[in-house]
Amino acid sequence: MPLIFITTNLSKDKVPDNFISEFAEEVAHIMKKPIQVRGNTPLVIKLQQNETQTEIVRCYSGNTNRRSNVSIWLYRPRAAVVMVRDLQPFDNPERNKKTSSGIINFVVEGLKLSPNRINTVMLPEDANCIGLGDGSLLSEKQH
């Protein structure tokens, strides 16, 4: 069940209406995941658009009285970051390159961005950290 977050400074009119559905199919193909399981889509994709030029992140270093602010500046116009979280470990550099390359190529085509304006971040997800609607954890449902 990959969770994919696409953050871009593109306005809504610059993103084709069918981008998310086509992206879901492409990611399912790239990551060798089914597009549907028992009528449900096991891919979750969130597109965040019109991101501002700065984002303030508050970091806590163990002590809530000691707080530091980190500013992240997006200097480049027309950029995107794609974060992929999945239960599979991202421990194979060759597979990671293929996944990243496939995602970047699709985003380049779909959003008309330059490849040097797109980054992918791949992070493993822990099934013990995903709560379900019935109060159980995803790890309890896996066999």
Image: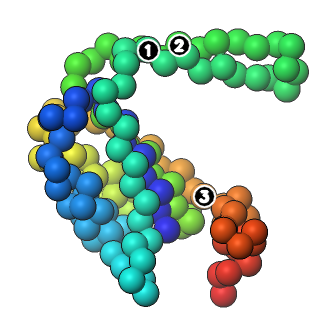
- Say what secondary structure mark 2 lies in: strand
Q: CA distance from mark 1 to mark 3?
A: 27 Å
Relative image position of residue 8 (x, y in whole percent): 31, 32
95 shown above or below 32: above
Name the residue at 71% across, 73% down.
134
The residue where tag 3 is placed is 125
Label of residue 71 in the image: 2
Q: Residue furthest front?
A: 134
Sequence order check: which comes first, mark 1 or mark 3? Answer: 1
The residue where tag 1 is placed is 54
Label of residue 102 in the image: none
Q: Nearer the viewer, residue 98 or 48?
A: 48
Disc 1 to disc 2: CB gap under 8 Å? yes
State which quadrant residue 56 falls in.
top right
Relative image position of residue 47 (x, y in whole percent): 35, 44
Sequence order check: which comes first, mark 3 or mark 2? Answer: 2
